[in-house]
Image (spheres, grey):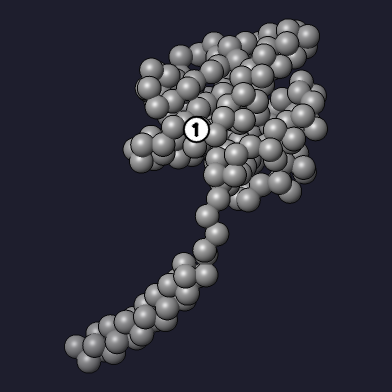
Amino acid sequence: MAMDKDRNARHKRAMQRKKEHVDDRIAAATEDRGLLLVLTGNGKGKSSSAFGMLARSVGHGLRCAVVQFIKGTWECGEQLLFAKNPAVEFHVMGTGFTWETQDRQTDIAAAESAWSKAEAILADEATDLVILDELTYMLTYGYLDKARVLAALRARPARQHVVITGRNASRELLELADTVSEVKDVRHAFNHGVKAQKGLDY
């Protein structure tokens, strides 16, 4: 009993110190502006995280927009959920994966068309959150002009949040971002012969 009492007292002191530290950090964070987030890495969950933020933003009544690059031929749960939501403007490049199209010029044209929509959204003061899903590939493959993309991101409204997903985010994107999360691939069922699962993978 005495040991439990001592342990509880030590725990309380530790949590008090932690609370003071957290409270100090919260008090010091006074800047309020739009953020650029990059979710990259080889692991699963980058787009899922972005769409979680979309759900949170919609819940707060924010006006949102999504431009999906790469994807488009599969029926995706996030598109089914958000595409008809009046709070979300939703665009899909629609060509599917690049290894399926096998046509660089067609992919470039589709990417540029999708980016034109993204550019207009990034210039819209009324849009609070923008998801640019799988945008990193468009830069890695050279489908979009990197300088043009970076310029639009820099010039966006001051309070607009942007979330970019995809593997191999370029150095310039990483340097521009306020928050970068790298999702590590520890294990994936697909690599062990398990097919993509509805609701988990698409």
- Looking at the image, can residue 185 be seen? no
Percent of width and height locating residue 199 = 39, 26
Image: 160 above or below 140: below
The three-letter amino acid code for the residue at tag 1 is Ala
In this rendering, position of residue 26 left or right of residue 154: left
Looking at the image, residue 57 sits to the left or right of residue 173; the answer is left
**Dot 1 alpha-carbon crowd within 10 angstroms: few under 14, some 14 to 19, many 20 or more:** some
Q: In this view, does 87 lie above or below 25?
A: above
Is residue 32 shown above or below 78? Answer: below
Q: Which x, y percent locates residue 97?
A: 64, 16
Question: Residue 1: image x %, image y %?
Answer: 19, 88
Residue at 37% in and 22% down: 85
Q: Nearer the viewer, residue 131 or 70?
A: 131
Residue located farthest toward the bottom when viewing the structure as drawn: 2
Residue name at image x 62 percent, y 30 percent: 123
The residue labelled by disc 1 is: 126
* Secondary structure at numbered mark 1: loop
Q: Which residue lies furthest to the front in this view?
A: 125
Residue 9 figure quarter = bottom left
